[in-house]
Image: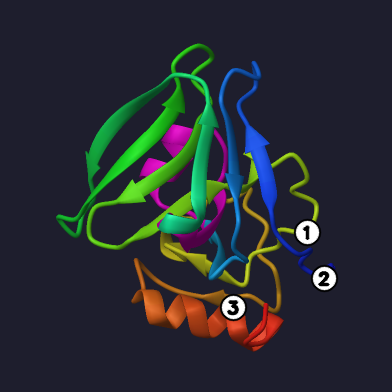
Amino acid sequence: MRLPIPDPPYEGGCLCGHVRYRLDARPATMTACHCDACKKLSGGTNLLVITAPRDRFHHLSGEVQRYRRTGESGRQSDVVRCATCGTRLWHEPLSFPIVTLAAGTLDDPSWVVPASEIWVERASPAAIFHSDATRFHGQPPRDDQIAAFQALYGDDA
C-alpha cells in the first residue's frame, strides 16, 4: 500500500537519540537496495532509502563517525553513523550532491515504500518485493531511479 508522501520537513535520528537531522525537501527517489554492502551494513535483507538534495539536509545534533566506502563501480560514499550507538543514518556520495537517508531512521517512516528495487540479483531469499516497484539488476543510472519514482508518485512527489 502506498500512502501519500507528506510535505517536508522530515526529521529523524539514531537509536540512542544523540544524533538528529532534518530534511527540507521531498524525496527524489525511494529505493530498496539488495546489494551485499547494504545487507551487511543494515543487518537486514535490504536497506530502504530515500534520496534528496544534500543542500536541503541538515545535521542538527550529535557526534557522528564516517566510513568512506568504495563500491564495485569505484565510486565512493561516506557512510555516516552515530558515534554513540552506531546507527547507520545516511550516506553522502562523493560523485553526486545528494544525501541517501536510511528510511528506518526517520521519526515517521510509514510513508516510505520503494519505487525501485536495485541489485535484485543479490536479493536474499527472504526479501519481499513490491509488485509495482521497478526492479533493476545492479546499480542503475540515477535518472532511471528518479523516473521509476515519478512513475508512481508523479513529478510533484
Image quadrant holding the N terminus, namely bottom right
Q: CA distance from mark 1 to mark 2?
A: 7 Å
Residue 131 falls left or right of residue 127: right
Q: Give the residue type that dot 3 points to.
A: Phe
Q: Nearer the viewer, mark 3 or mark 2?
A: 2
Check if residue 49 falls in the magenta segment.
Answer: yes
The residue tagged 3 is 149
Q: Residues within 10 Å of mark 2 (few under 14, many from 20)?
A: few
Q: Quadrant of residue 15?
A: top right
Say if mark 1 contacts mark 3, CB within 8 Å.
no
The residue tagged 1 is 111
Towards the viewer: 117 or 150: 150
For the residue labelled by badge 2, is the local secondary structure a helix, a strand or a loop?
A: loop
Tell me if residue 143 comes above or below residue 70 in the rendering.
Answer: below
Residue 7 image offset from top left, x and y in percent: 75, 64
Numbered tag placed on residue 4 in the rendering: 2
Could you tell me which residue is drawn at 62 percent across and 52 percent down? 127
Residue 27 image offset from top left, x and y in percent: 59, 65
Q: Which residues are magenta?
A: 33-54
Towards the viewer: 9 or 134: 9
Say if mark 1 contacts mark 2, CB within 8 Å.
yes
Q: Give the residue type that dot 1 points to.
A: Trp
